[in-house]
Amino acid sequence: MSKIIAGNFKSNLNRTQTSQYLQKLDSLVQTSDSKVFIFPSISSMVENNFKHITIGAQNCHYALNGAFTGEVTLEHLNELNINTILIAHSERRNLFGESDEICAKKFEFFKEHNFEIFYCIGENLETRNNKNELEFLANQLSKIDLKYDKLIIAYEPIWAIGTGINASAEQISKSTSYLKSLTNAPIIYGGSVNENNAKEILKISDGILVGSASLNIDKFYQMIKE
Ligand code: 13P
């Protein structure tokens, strides 16, 4: 199975930087058999019309359009031909108050519209220290349809995001094999993935979701080559 290599730009890179990056990356990845996704910041979204990269949305409200100040809605994604979305990232949950219920509503809406859905889950350090992480992960998935054939689960332990401390191979394998017992969806890993650890992580996962290290095109391309 080809690997999923996804870059989440979060709130980084402006429109000019994003479009230069995407054009360059699209020409570089011509020979890769990985599936490459980029999630630009919302204001740097571009049409999903690249040959070798799929553009996804980091966030979207679960409506076609309407009175939702500050949100983008399906109409905006449709215009850009975007049919991939990231839902339930821990930054959306923790900084912007998105509950499991809101994430599940988004999931249902975008499932109805046949989107490819990257659904993020991951425990915090306290849960891991209490050895409750598997139960916690199962609970985070309990409100969505795990049989949806366009689902990709991104396992991103919160303590590994942006810290420079990635989960160990053993920790990733334990969570991944448990998640594989719940669903046939690909399970990718995110949390301090970089050009030095990507190769090892790709051996034990279906792909990677990269934050800060994806902002540097040379580093990200190196990960794709792995
Ligand atoms: P970092 O790679 O910066 O740790 O971020 C991971 C992440 O949150 C990707 O969605």
Image (cartoon, helix red, strand yellow):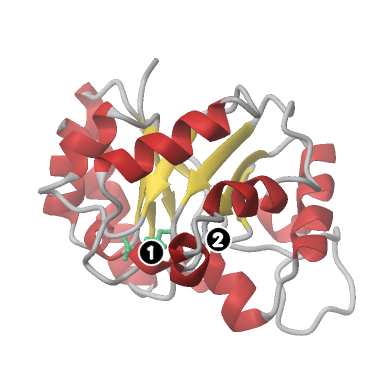
Whether residue 50 is visible, yes or no, is no
Considering the numbered disc 2 on the image, is that residue within a helix, a strand or a loop? loop
The 10 Å Cα crowd at callout 1, few under 14, some 14 to 19, many 20 or more, is: many
Left or right position of 113 against 24: right
Quadrant including the N terminus: top left
Left or right position of 63 against 148: right
Q: Disc 1 residue type?
A: Phe
**Residue at x-position 56% and y-position 34%:** 179
The 10 Å Cα crowd at callout 2, few under 14, some 14 to 19, many 20 or more, is: many
Whether residue 88 is visible, yes or no, is yes
- Residue 206 lies in what quarter of the image? top left
Q: Disc 2 residue type?
A: Gln
Eyeballing the image, is 93 above or below 56?
A: below
The one of 110 and 165 positioned closer to us in this rendering: 165
Q: Is label 2 in contact with label 1 (beta carbons under 8 Å)?
A: yes
Considering the numbered disc 1 on the image, is that residue within a helix, a strand or a loop? loop
**Residue at x-position 63% and y-position 60%:** 88
**Which disc is residue 131 wearing?**
none
Residue placed farthest to the top in the image? 1
The one of 167 and 117 positioned closer to us in this rendering: 167
Of the numbered discs 2 and 1, the one sitting upstream in the chain is 1
Residue 224: % across, % down: 22, 36
Residue 191: % across, % down: 34, 58
**Residue at x-position 52% and y-position 60%:** 123
